[in-house]
Amino acid sequence: MPVKQVSTDISWSAIWQGILTGLTIAILFALMPLLRIRKVSPLRSLRSSYDKDINERDPWRWLVYFLIAAFVIGFTIWQVGADWETLYFPLAIAVGLAILAGTAALLKWAVKKFFPVQWSYVWRQGIANLYRPNNQTLLLLVSVGLGTALISNMFFVRELLLQQVEKTTSGNQPNILLFDIQQAQVPQVKAVMDSFDMPLMRHVPITRLELATLNADSVAQLVQDSTDELETDYLTQDYQVTYRDTLLDTEKIVSGKWHTKQPKDGKIYVSVQEGVADKLQLEIGDSISFFENNRNIRVVIGSIREHKEEMLQPNFSFVFPEGTLDSFPQMNIMLTQADSVRQSVSFQQAFDLESSKRDRSRFWAGVENFR
């Protein structure tokens, strides 16, 4: 989608967060070598034989280890959120470090146990240097292994993301989304699609409704009730709902029954998304009502469905049976597919040309290219 102007701004909070994070990491990891030299006497720097070796355990080092671990855990919780799942990352880092340290120690032991005495002097001298005092062999092997693991993980995540994008936009999946199309504009949009020989892959009517009641309780009463566990945002928000007679490939009924049309008993059975049902504590058979411009519509929860975020498909909290929202104001979403970037650009330019012919309003509200 062409962008004529992009506004930029400096995020001072992000800058200060980066500075403080980097400074904290540098200080914590710099404390380890500094703690080892704080008890070194001046005489030892001149003649090592005049002073004893300092090999006793230092309790301050364990405090630094604790601070490093606490910082990693706290930083993860700050970035991801306070949840038990956030502990998986620092735990995985600790397990990875333990595996790398064990592998490095095993490698040193194997080289020393099976030292290649028949090799040339250069190789024997290089291997022997692994056991020189303060050679940091273990730390170096762990650092190289951890760095390699992190770089490999970045490439692995990159490939996963690219595969998800290719899966979303490849094959017969739509890659262009047209939104905010008024009901009177639908035939004109279809005509433009036909002129480019582009298929109408999905046509989604949308109606905006607000919650009025949950079972016998009004939304206003539930919001004021401080003892209720329902989240206020889910009670007071506007819901964009739709109607259709079939499930999508990305949806699955987890409980209840899918109703394609309004039954003979006069009740309207709707399907609610699983996450919304959990937030509003809705179960099969619960009664709720919506309103729009002083018009109410009462429905019954007929099914709870699960939605998989894998394809380019609009998702809705509530899905009504076909024909139950015909009298309510609607706007439309249309999904199509362009064979190439050139066709996508020409398709959008056709809408821009059509918009210029109308003085008071645009012919279309938006075209989004997902290629």
Image (cartoon, helix red, strand yellow):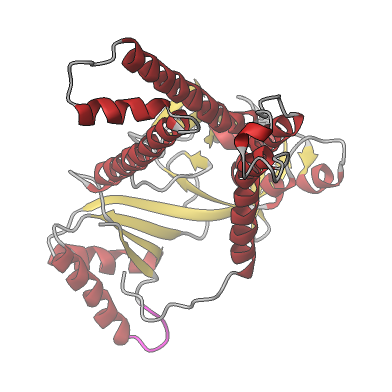
Q: Decide if residue 167 is on the left or right side of residue 292.
A: left
Q: Splitting the image into 4 quarters, where does residue 341 fall?
A: bottom left
Q: Position of residue 158 (x, y in %)?
A: 32, 44
Q: Position of residue 242 (x, y in %)?
A: 47, 47
- Residues 147 and 356: in front is 147
For residue 267, say whether it is visible.
no
Q: Splitting the image into 4 quarters, where does residue 126 fall?
A: top left
Q: Would residue 358 be counted in the magenta stretch? A: yes
Please name the predominant secondary structure of the magenta segment in the image: loop
Residue located 81% across and 46% down the image = 223
- Residues 94 and 127: in front is 127
Q: Splitting the image into 4 quarters, where does residue 284 fall?
A: top right
Q: Is residue 145 above or below residue 28?
A: above
Looking at the rendering, the stretch of residues picked out in magenta corresponds to 357-362
Q: Position of residue 220 (x, y in %)?
A: 80, 49
- Residues 337 and 20: in front is 20
Residue located 34% across and 69% down the image = 185
Q: Decide if residue 244 is on the left or right side of residue 166.
A: right
Quadrant of the image for the C terminus? bottom left
Q: Is residue 10 above or below residue 280?
A: below
Q: Is residue 122 above or below residue 232?
A: above
Quadrant of the image for the N terminus? bottom left
Q: Would residue 227 be counted in the magenta stretch? A: no
Residue located 30% across and 26% down the image = 127
Q: Position of residue 240 (x, y in %)?
A: 53, 52
